[in-house]
Image: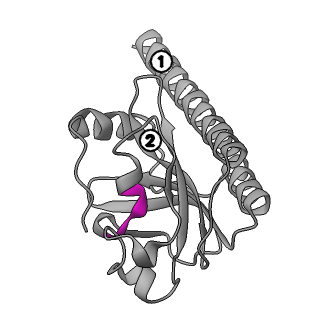
Amino acid sequence: MIAPVPSNEAERLAELESFRILDTPAEQVFDDITFLASQIYETPFAVMSLVDRDRQWFKSSVGLKVPETHRDLAFCAHAIWDPTEVMVVEDAAYDPRFSNNPLVIADPSIRFYAGAPLRTSKGNALGTLCVIDRVPRQLTEGDDQALRALARLVTNELQMRRAVLNLNDWLDEAVARDAA
C-alpha cells in the first residue's frame, strides 16, 4: 500500500530542501547515531531516512547497501504521516500496508520496523530514524523513548547544520556587497 501524502507536503518538502542535505556525502555524526540505534536495538539495519518527493534517501544506514528506495516502497513514508508518533510495525508480513511490499517479500525480508520522525521546530517530519529487523519484535516504552531521543539528536544536528549554512550564505553576501 502506498503511503498517503501528508496534507502539508508542499511545506514539508520546501523545509526539507532548506536543509540542503539531500545527496550529500556521509557525515560521521549521523553515522554515529545510526550505529548507536543499531547497537541499542540489536537490529541488523538502522537508517536515517529522508523522504523526498519520489524517493526515500538514506543519509546514513547500517546494513543496507542501497542509497535510496522509491517512496512507494518506503515504510518511512508512512511514518511521517504523524510526526508526533513513533511508527511500529511488529510483523510486516501481517500488516496490510506492507505484506505485499517487495522489501518484505524479498531481500532484505523486513519483518520489524520502528521509525521515529525527524520532526523540525515547524512540526514537519523530514524523514525518520528507524531500526529494522528480519524477525518480528515489539517495542517497549523505554525503547520508544530512546528512539525518540536519538531522532531528536539527528534533528538538532540537522538544524545546527542549516544554521551554519545560512550564516555562511549571509557572510558570502556581505563580502560580495562590500567588494562591489
Q: Which residues are magenta?
A: 73-77
* Left or right: 166 as drawn, with respect to 134: left
Q: Is residue 162 above or below residue 103?
A: above
* Left or right: 50 as drawn, with respect to 159: left
* Left or right: 114 as drawn, with respect to 30: left
First in sequence: mark 2 or mark 1? 2
- Residue type, numbered disc 1: Trp
Q: Was residue 168 drawn as part of the magenta stretch in this picture?
A: no
Residue 76 picture quarter: bottom left
- Mark 2 surroundings: few (<14), some (14-19) or many (≥20) residues within 10 A: few
Which colour style is shown? Answer: one colour
State the residue at coordinates (62%, 35%): 152
Percent x, y of residue 64: 58, 75
**Cα distance between the residues tagged 2 and 1:** 15 Å
State the residue at coordinates (51%, 77%): 110
Q: Is residue 9 above or below residue 89?
A: above
